[in-house]
Amino acid sequence: MSDEGTSDEGTSTARSLAGWLERVTFADLPEAEATARIVDAVAEWAAAQGWRVYRRAPSVFPLPAPLRGTSVLDVACARPDGPPVAIEVDRLDRQRTVDKLLAEAAAGRLAIWVRWGAGPFPPPPLPVHLVVREASRRSGRWHTVAARPAPRHSGAVGSGDTVHAEELPWEP
């Protein structure tokens, strides 16, 4: 498979995951629980694709010294019709995550970095694909950011942006 084909596939796969994560909502969660909610959603998305899903799967990237062995991926996926998918979920911009995903891509895996939080989210180097789930923090707790506009309030008399007050009869 050419690099261009892998890139196109990676873009399509990342878009699919981004669409899935838009449905993930949470409110008033500490950081660890918000991360866990997103990791769960990533695993659900992969399972919905019909792929085998592995959490905390071994990575090809070594642990930092003095530790021995290899790092782990938040989610790894085995696909019958394409290269494996390596997914990391982070709130922070970590060079170690970029390095790990670059190593996964060099080993033939499709590498996706799910970043969540308030941003900004600078893009990682290719061939790592970025998926973003925006969230905001209030009082130390995390909330998803809704892209939907506030609902129209009912009961207003009139049309458009002009609201007319209706005078009611006064009874003493």
Image: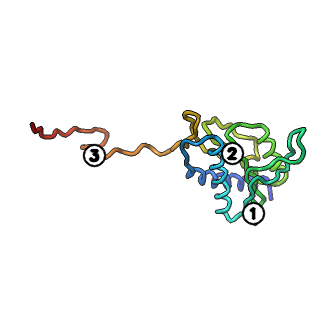
Extreme residue in the left direction: 172
Q: Secondary structure at mark 3?
A: loop
Residue at screen point 31% across, 46% down: 154
Residue 30 is left or right of residue 163, and the answer is right
Check residue 130 in the rendering and tell me which mark sits there, or answer none: 2
Check residue 110 in the rendering and tell me which mark sits there, or answer none: none
In the rendered image, residue 39, in percent from the top left (x then y), is placed at: 67, 51
**For mark 1, what is the residue?**
79
Alpha carbon distance from label 3 to label 2: 44 Å
In the rendered image, residue 35, in percent from the top left (x then y), is placed at: 65, 45
Label 2 is placed on what type of residue? Leu
In the rendered image, residue 73, in percent from the top left (x then y), is placed at: 77, 50
- Is residue 5 visible in the rendered image? The answer is no
Q: Quadrant of residue 124?
A: top right
Between 34 and 16, which is closer to the camera in this rendering? 34
Between 143 and 2, which is closer to the camera in this rendering? 143
In the rendered image, residue 146, in percent from the top left (x then y), is placed at: 51, 44
Residues at marks 3 and 1 touching, judged by CB atoms closer than 8 Å? no
- Is residue 104 visible in the rendered image? The answer is yes
Residues at marks 3 and 2 touching, judged by CB atoms closer than 8 Å? no
Residue neighbourhood size for the residue with mark 3, other residues' Cα within 10 Å, grouped as few (<14), some (14–19), many (≥20): few
Q: Secondary structure at mark 2?
A: strand
Extreme residue in the top direction: 139
- Which is nearer the N-term, disc 3 or disc 1? 1
Residue at screen point 74% across, 50% down: 74
Residues at marks 1 and 2 touching, judged by CB atoms closer than 8 Å? no
Mark 3, mark 1: which one is toward the viewer?
3
Label 3 is placed on what type of residue? Gly
Between 158 and 126, which is closer to the camera in this rendering? 158
**For mark 3, what is the residue?**
155
Residue at screen point 66% across, 48% down: 36
